[in-house]
């Protein structure tokens, strides 16, 4: 079996030799043109005049399109048709594209894009959550509210209450490969687009709309991305549309890639949130009721903000059974980049909210936060199936039946030596006035499935050639997560052939149609199943044929080790394929899968939005210099649940990378806009992504030995997003270190930069 | 326009290029050696690292005309028939995910190991972390990258 093996990434051999091709590496045909956007210089107002004569006069420029040159103006939105390709007359954020330059080189296009002369009638811009609230500027009519029981009464009746507000910053994706697209005009007005996208079908759909042609006239191909993290779910639409329009207008291939600064200034990021909370609890820290008000800064266009904000609400409980809860969510419209999908999709923000509540409760009672967290956990899945306990329900009414965190946290507590280290940290802090240490264990329970239920489907196309080699295609995209390798392992297992027999091919809307974005961690769950269905169909046809020729029954035909065993006979897989071909048996099949059991009403906030939950827990220890706010992660221990992993090495890679990315989000990665709405942190010089020396000095990562209780592909679990949320342990460890400086609760906001840490230290010392 | 002649991956190449041509652009556009990636254009991410006369250099901020007569090695030229031990180690230790940082990481790491060997210094885990500060990886969390460099260093 090829599954459950730690094979390297499918393209590792290409990556280490520099021969893996990203969009900008694909040899473009002669005469390829290059595109760049000219950007607005104000955040809000009206474009009153746009003089592009200097742009047009620049040597190398072939064509220039302003807002008046495109009619109708193409739309780039994945949801609400509210994202014109070019802004104007209305300007909605600083950095919004307002004209498009087509030139014979990338550099010429970029230089010319700086020469547009725009005049504006500038209006006051809404840049912050508070400003948007005051102006009642929002998506949807009013807040979305979900309730479980009567939280207000439960809090009023509780012996203790804590309340507060927490700011949680956004996050730049910083996929190392910037956004890129290449459009190749075809005969009869057709278009082929190479795009660095998590969502080829969406690119196909938006390009077809922009060109005014049916989707069948556009084919989109994506072999790989140099990172995506959600930032390539919708943010590539503008580039693909621009390239396709320019390709049609000029009849020549057109390519566009954003330079890093443009990428950061133009594209959306993780939603920043402000979360107000009030919780009532008993002397042991057991929660009686919680109220959350979540404010999400969505930026100028709707994009994916509604499902992102929904997912924040859906994770407001994280691992804790809340007897009563009220969750209110405001989706605020501001004159900033349109916030978009980012690994976790709002879930992490919702979970930071409840982890903050747990931390605050423990501080209020003077108890160990881990003990408080545990007392509030959902009932263990083991106890539920043994009928010892009833399943708890989430605030949206879904029974939590597969809860594993009691067992996982106990294991991690032991392997990380939590109790002894808790005592050692206390001793250290008593003895050291300047350097303070902090320790925190935080759990993760993350819901797996798209909350827009119809997206939970996938298709695959598999061919077996007469020489026994296999062509594999499915709707998922590869962004480094190892999806292609995992799915190829599934295919190789179905046919019992070595991995080398399976050719992994680029995602192609001409092979598998109507795909969902590779998002919501669902890539291997959905595509692995679809591929298995396709492979099993072909395998069963071969088996039926061989059973007939060998006068036996199909169940006596076995596929293993590159051979096919038929009763007592034994032939190579290639011989079997050849025999089936000659008997006129079809060796090509599609596969289709849709996730079962889902039933969700997002307006009411009731039902079962998720097929299952993925779990994990992390313990992080930090040391904080209380004079400067500088800090280090000393050690991190993680136990993560990937079910029966399809490829443990790839999954551990996701966990390590996810944790570091999550810790970066909550500690060093700070986005700063100035008062005019200009993003001031638009390069790695000012925006601090974790570097090699920032990862914890001791970093122990293990996978939980278990299998998915639901019937997923080989009982594995999704692993893309959940580990990012383990990074909360770094924030809570810093909070713990600050708490060692004085009696009041630190109330630490995120990202916990040295400045914020110093402010918090001042607060607790005051 | 200036004519430059230099050796790239062991082969002599001669081209007339605009004076402002960056080495990264020269390699990618003029020679079609696209294994050298550009992640930031501003000398901060390390995706574009190549060797110039045996030392690591960020090609996104190196002018090609300044390299007349130089020896340049890119990721495509690192393997000498067999994979270089660093390339093998990155594969074996899963030191890559999306792979975009990989060519720069490998070229920088080879330079680090060579330098430490030449100076007779031991390359500790801590030193590797410190030396790789100028190479950003957004995917892996660096753990496997450091493991790969340690393992390759033992074989180089
Ligand atoms: S592209 Fe040269 S350092 Fe980033
Ligand atoms: S593997 Fe993606 S940036 Fe390093």
Image (cartoon, coloured by chain):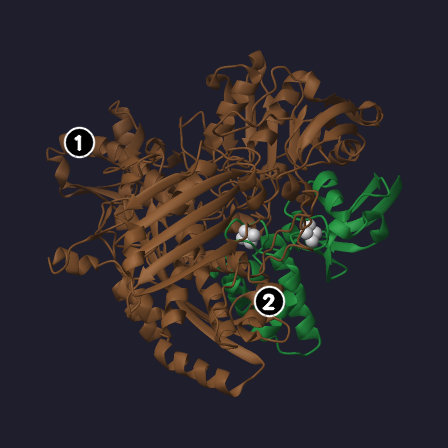
Q: Give percent across and percent down for residue A55.
A: 81, 27
Q: Give percent across and percent down for residue A315.
A: 36, 50
Identify the residue at horizontal 61%, vertical 58% (top origin): B105
Name which quarter of the figure residue A500 lies in: top left
Q: Nearer the viewer, residue A495 or A638?
A: A638
Q: Nearer the viewer, residue A343 or A644?
A: A343
**Which numbered disc covers residue A544?**
1
Horizontally, is A97 left or right of A424 in the view?
Answer: right
Does label 1 point to a residue whose CB lies under 8 Å from ligand 2? no
Tag 1 secondary structure: helix
Q: Is residue A12 above or below residue A75?
A: below
Q: Colour of chain A?
A: brown
Residue at the extreme top of the image, as rendered: A188
Q: Colour of chain B?
A: green
Q: Give percent across and percent down for residue A576.
A: 26, 35
Q: Residues within 10 Å of mark 2 (few under 14, many from 20)?
A: some
Pair 2/1: label in front:
2
Tag 2 secondary structure: helix
Residue at the extreme right of the image, as rendered: B2
Cα–Cα gap, marks 2 and 1: 72 Å
Chain at tag 2: A
The reply to whether residue A100 is in sight is no
Q: Which residue is mark 2?
A: A759
Name which quarter of the figure residue A7 lies in: bottom left
């Amino acid at each position: 079996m090829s599954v459950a093996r730690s094979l390297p990434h499918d393209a590792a051999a290409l990556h280490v030799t520099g021969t893996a091709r990203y969009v900008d590496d694909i040899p473009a045909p002669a005469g390829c043109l290059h595109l760049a956007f000219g950007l607005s210089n104000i955040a809000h107002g009206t474009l009153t005049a746009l003089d592009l004569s200097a742009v047009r006069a620049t040597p190398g420029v072939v064509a220039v399109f302003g807002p008046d040159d495109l009619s109708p103006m193409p739309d780039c939105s994945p949801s609400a048709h509210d994202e014109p390709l070019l802004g104007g007359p209305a300007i909605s954020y600083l950095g919004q594209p307002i004209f498009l330059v087509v030139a014979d080189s990338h550099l010429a296009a970029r230089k010319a894009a700086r020469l547009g002369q725009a005049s504006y009638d500038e209006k006051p811009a809404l840049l912050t959550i508070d400003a948007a609230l005051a102006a009642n500027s929002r998506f949807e009519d009013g807040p979305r509210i979900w309730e479980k029981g009567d939280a207000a009464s439960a809090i009023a009746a509780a012996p203790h209450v804590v309340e507060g507000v927490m700011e949680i910053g956004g996050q730049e994706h910083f996929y190392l490969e910037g956004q890129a697209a290449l459009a190749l005009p075809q005969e009869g007005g057709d278009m082929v687009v190479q795009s660095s996208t998590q969502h080829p079908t969406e690119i196909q759909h938006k390009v077809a709309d922009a060109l005014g042609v049916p989707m069948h006239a556009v084919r989109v191909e994506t072999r790989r991305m140099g990172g995506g993290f959600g930032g390539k779910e919708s943010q590539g639409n503008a580039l693909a549309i621009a390239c396709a329009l320019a390709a049609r207008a000029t009849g020549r291939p057109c390519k566009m890639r954003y330079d890093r600064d443009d990428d950061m200034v133009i594209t959306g990021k993780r939603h920043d949130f402000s979360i107000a909370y009030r919780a009532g609890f008993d002397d042991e820290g057991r929660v009686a009721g919680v109220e959350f008000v979540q404010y999400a800064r969505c930026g100028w266009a709707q994009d994916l903000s509604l499902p992102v904000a929904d997912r924040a609400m859906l994770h407001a409980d994280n691992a804790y059974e809340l007897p009563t809860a009220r969750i209110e969510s405001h989706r605020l419209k501001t004159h900033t980049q349109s916030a978009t999908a980012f690994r976790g999709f709002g879930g992490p923000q919702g979970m930071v909210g409840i982890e903050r509540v747990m931390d605050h409760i423990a501080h209020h009672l003077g108890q160990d936060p881990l003990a408080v967290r545990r007392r509030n956990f959902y009932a263990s899945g083991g106890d539920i199936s043994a009928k010892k306990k009833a399943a708890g329900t989430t605030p949206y009414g879904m029974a939590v039946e597969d809860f594993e965190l009691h067992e996982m946290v106990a294991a991690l507590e032991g392997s990380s030596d939590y109790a002894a280290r808790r005592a050692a940290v206390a001793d250290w802090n008593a003895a050291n006035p300047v350097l303070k240490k902090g320790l925190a264990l935080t759990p993760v329970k993350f819901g797996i499935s798209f909350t827009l239920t119809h997206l939970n489907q996938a298709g695959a196309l598999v061919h077996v050639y007469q020489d026994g080699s296999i062509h594999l295609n499915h709707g998922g995209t590869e962004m480094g997560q190892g999806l292609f390798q995992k799915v190829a392992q599934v295919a190789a297992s179905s046919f019992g052939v070595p991995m080398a027999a399976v050719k992994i091919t680029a995602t192609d809307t001409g092979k598998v149609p109507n795909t969902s974005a590779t998002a919501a961690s669902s890539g291997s769950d959905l595509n692995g199943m679809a591929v298995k269905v396709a492979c099993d169909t072909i395998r069963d046809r071969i088996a039926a044929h061989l059973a007939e020729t060998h006068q036996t029954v199909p169940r006596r035909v076995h596929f293993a080790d590159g051979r096919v065993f038929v009763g007592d006979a034994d032939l190579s897989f290639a011989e079997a394929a050849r025999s089936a071909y000659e008997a006129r048996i079809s060796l090509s099949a599609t596969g289709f899968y849709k996730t079962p059991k889902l039933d969700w009403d997002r307006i009411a906030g009731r039902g079962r939005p998720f097929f299952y939950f993925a779990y994990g827990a992390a313990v992080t220890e930090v040391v904080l210099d209380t004079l400067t706010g500088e800090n280090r992660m000393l050690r991190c221990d993680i136990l993560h649940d990937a079910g029966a992993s399809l490829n443990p090495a790839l999954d551990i890679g996701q966990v390590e990378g996810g944790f570091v990315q999550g810790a970066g989000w909550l500690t060093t990665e700070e986005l700063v806009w100035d008062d005019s709405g200009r993003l001031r942190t638009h390069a790695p010089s000012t925006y601090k992504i974790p570097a090699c020396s920032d990862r914890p000095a001791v970093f122990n990562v293990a996978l939980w030995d278990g299998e998915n209780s639901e019937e997923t592909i080989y009982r594995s679990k999704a692993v893309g997003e959940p580990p990012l949320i383990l990074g909360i342990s770094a924030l809570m460890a810093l909070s713990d270190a600050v708490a060692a400086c004085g009696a009041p609760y630190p109330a630490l906001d995120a990202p916990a930069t040295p400045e914020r840490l110093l402010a918090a230290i001042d607060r607790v010392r005051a | 326009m200036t004519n430059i002649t230099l050796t790239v991956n062991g082969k002599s190449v001669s081209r007339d290029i605009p004076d402002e041509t960056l080495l990264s652009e020269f390699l990618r556009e003029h020679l079609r050696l696209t294994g050298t990636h550009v992640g930031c254009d501003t000398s901060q991410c390390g995706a574009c690292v190549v060797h110039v006369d045996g030392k690591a250099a960020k090609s996104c901020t190196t002018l090609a005309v300044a390299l007349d007569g130089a020896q340049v090695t890119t990721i495509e030229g690192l393997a000498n028939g067999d994979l270089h031990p660093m390339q093998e180690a990155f594969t074996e230790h899963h030191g890559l995910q999306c792979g975009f940082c990989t060519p720069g990481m490998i070229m920088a790491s080879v330079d680090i190991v060579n330098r430490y060997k030449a100076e007779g210094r031991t390359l500790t885990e801590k030193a590797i972390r410190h030396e790789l500060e100028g190479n950003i990886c957004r995917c892996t969390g660096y753990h496997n990258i450091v493991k790969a460099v340690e393992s390759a260093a033992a074989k180089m």
